[in-house]
Image: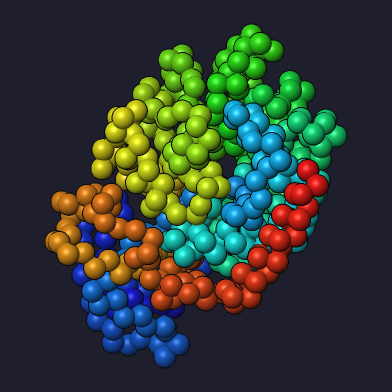
Amino acid sequence: MIILKNATYIDWKTFDFIKTNLLIEEGENGAVKFLNTLEGLNADDSIIDCTGKYVTKSFAVGHHHVYSALARGMPAPKKTPTNFYEILQYIWWALDKKLDKDMIEASALATAMACAKAGSTFVIDHHASPNNIEGSLEIIAGAFKKVGISHLLCYEITDRDGLDKAEKGLAETENYLKNHQGLIGLHASFTVGEETLKKATDLMQKKNSGIHIHVAEDKYDQKHCLRNYGKRVVERLHEYGVLNSSKTILGHCLHIDDHERELINTSKSFVVQNTESNLNNNVGYFSSKGVGENIMLGTDGMHSDMLRSAKAAYFVGQGFDTINFSSAYTRFRKVHHYINANNFKGDGENNLVVLNYDSPTEINKENFPGHFIFGINSNHVRDVISNGKLIVKDGIIQTVNEQNMLGFTQEQSLRLWEKLKTC
């Protein structure tokens, strides 16, 4: 077991500051106990001195894309995109088609390590590798397990590469869910036809799962839905029962009208906001108006730093949303409520982060939200405990040889970039 000695524990729900020693049990159901004294400890217990440090619950990513991890620094596409559809066509759909099993593993390792070092111990991912579908989720799960990151995965089922690939995506999903917790992934309404949507929602019912899908990220999604189905995207999903599951995650939800917002608000589903990705793709701005309280935050594959995502949501939201320090923090932590409410494993109270936050000003229960927005950054993450196991110590990954892993990921990125030259 791990002992955090002389810690200042910040309760992630109440902001109470407690000076204490913490005993952390290992395992998915491991407890966290407050100790007044360190007498009677076992010789095998690992003691970490947290004098002057803050300890709180670790973080979780509400929407990620492992498949984008090797994109950083890649060559520019042969044609410069002029709209969102072309960004998908010339960048992301070109990239994901080139991924092989080694590249998928490298992408997952890079993502898991980046998440861990930024304080996240649980990741909800939405994967795509159209020419290497079978076994792809198992590869990602294996890489995450190696680093020590809990996860909720899905494969991005879509008709964009043909119905045969959609069938393979459905088969990969059903096979993976036999042995793992996960979701039913769909790309977006505009690449999912009626037959595939029906099969995906039938699988959702069969597995008592939820749909993880991009919703109205760009106006194109709504235009396509209205033109082809005579209804708006959320209405279409609602008619198929997608919103009936509390496990359903609706990504982005930028270009939705008041009726769609009401459908979401009165449903069990969760919305995940991805501010920086929206800025990067120039698709619009998120507004929480009318969608309810089930709003969590993601990175959309832009990076793996949830503290950064929370700050972006707050700062950009000043002009386009109703958001303050407290509601930004609530969205940042809502992913834990999603995980807990749906009985997913891997996000218990023995998932903790130790912050070396040397604030020049007083930090306390009353002003913690201000420090959360303006002070605490991922560079303050010193140690990370996942399911009671120390996976980051003094900023260094403990579960794998970080330098060896980075050598592997860099090698695979160069292979990927070379293949992209043929696009």
**Left or right relative to 58: residue 278:** right
Residue occupying image coordinates x 50% and y 39% = 280
Quarter holding the N terminus is: bottom left
Q: Position of residue 112 (x, y in %)?
A: 56, 61
Residue 181 shows up from this direction: no
* Residue 423 figure quarter: top right
Residue furthest right as drawn: 164
Look at the picture and state if 121 lies above or below 288.
Answer: below
Q: Position of residue 398 (x, y in %)?
A: 52, 76
**Left or right relative to 395: residue 105:** right
Q: Position of residue 165 (x, y in %)?
A: 81, 37
Residue furthest bottom as drawn: 43
Look at the picture and state if 49 lies above or below 259.
Answer: below
Q: How many marks?
A: 0
Residue occupying image coordinates x 52% and y 61% = 114
Look at the picture and state if 198 lies above or below 139.
Answer: above
* Residue 285 figure quarter: top left
Viewer-side residue, 333 vs 191: 191
Look at the picture and state if 50 lies above or below 15.
Answer: below
Q: Position of residue 53 (x, y in %)?
A: 27, 71
**Left or right relative to 321: residue 233:** right
Q: What is the basis of the colouring in this image?
A: rainbow
Residue occupying image coordinates x 32% and y 40% = 314
Viewer-side residue, 320 vs 84: 84
Viewer-side residue, 159 vs 343: 159
Residue 213 shows up from this direction: yes
